[in-house]
């Protein structure tokens, strides 16, 4: 029982940065009274997870590791959708309106993480 659990947790741990980014992005959306975007992003990610489970677990016979990969990829998809929405709404821009790089965006979002532990 332990080796499959280790495989699952190892794969899922790769998606932890995406989970944190998605959580912060959802909080920003909800804080700006936009509940529709997180709902749609999570629904699309859930659908992608379901398709990924069928693909990886059933067709490719990857077992529990396939389920972990499907979940991890769906979490990355959710984070990407939410970040794209925040960027389009102007929340992820530098002062002066110039575009930011991906790494600058990630740093900007992760600067909110300490506040998650206070709340």
Image (tube, rainbow, N blue to C red):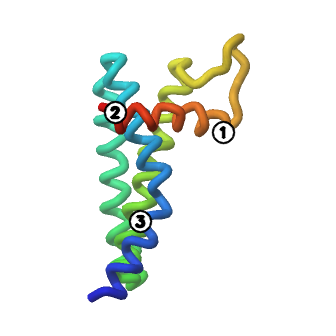
Identified at 48% across, 29% down, the residue is 85
Query: Along the line of sight, which residue is nearer the eye, 100 or 70?
Result: 100
Give the image location of residue 60, x and y in percent.
42, 82
Q: Secondary structure at mark 2?
A: helix
* Of callouts 3 and 2, the N-terminal one: 3
Identified at 49% across, 51% down, the residue is 17
Q: Find residue 12 and name its label.
A: 3
For the residues labelled 1 and 2, say whether their Cβ atoms are less than 8 Å apart: no
Q: Residues within 10 Å of mark 1 (few under 14, many from 20)?
A: few
Give the image location of residue 55, x and y in percent.
39, 72
Q: Residues within 10 Å of mark 2 (few under 14, many from 20)?
A: few
Q: Find residue 111 and name its label.
A: none
Query: Along the line of sight, which residue is nearer the eye, 112 or 58?
Result: 112
Q: Residues within 10 Å of mark 3 (few under 14, many from 20)?
A: many
Q: How many marks?
A: 3
The residue that mark 1 highlights is: 102
* Of callouts 3 and 1, the N-terminal one: 3
Query: Along the line of sight, which residue is nearer the eye, 15 or 59?
Result: 15
- Marks 3 and 1, how far apart at CA: 22 Å
Identified at 41% across, 49% down, the residue is 19
Q: Secondary structure at mark 1?
A: helix
Give the image location of residue 50, x and y in percent.
30, 61
- Marks 3 and 2, how far apart at CA: 25 Å
* Of callouts 1 and 2, the N-terminal one: 1
Q: Secondary structure at mark 3?
A: helix
The residue sitting at the front extreme is: 118
Quadrant of the frame with the N terminus: bottom left
Residue 89 horizontal side relative to residue 33, left or right: right
Give the image location of residue 59, x and y in percent.
38, 80
The vertical placement of 112 against 15, above or below, is above
The vertical placement of 80 against 1, above or below, is above
Q: Find residue 118 and name its label.
A: 2
């Amino acid at each position: 029982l332990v080796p499959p659990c280790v495989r699952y947790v190892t794969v899922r741990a790769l998606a932890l940065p995406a989970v944190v980014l998605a959580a912060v992005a959802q909080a920003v959306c909800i804080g700006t009274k936009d509940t529709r975007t997180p709902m749609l992003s999570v629904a699309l990610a859930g659908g992608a997870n379901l398709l990924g489970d069928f693909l990886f677990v059933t067709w490719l016979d990857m077992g529990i590791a396939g389920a972990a990969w499907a979940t991890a990829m769906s979490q990355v998809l959710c984070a990407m959708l939410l970040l794209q929405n925040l960027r389009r709404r102007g929340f992820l821009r530098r002062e002066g309106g110039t575009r930011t790089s991906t790494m600058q965006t990630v740093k900007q979002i992760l600067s909110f993480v300490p506040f998650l532990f206070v709340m």
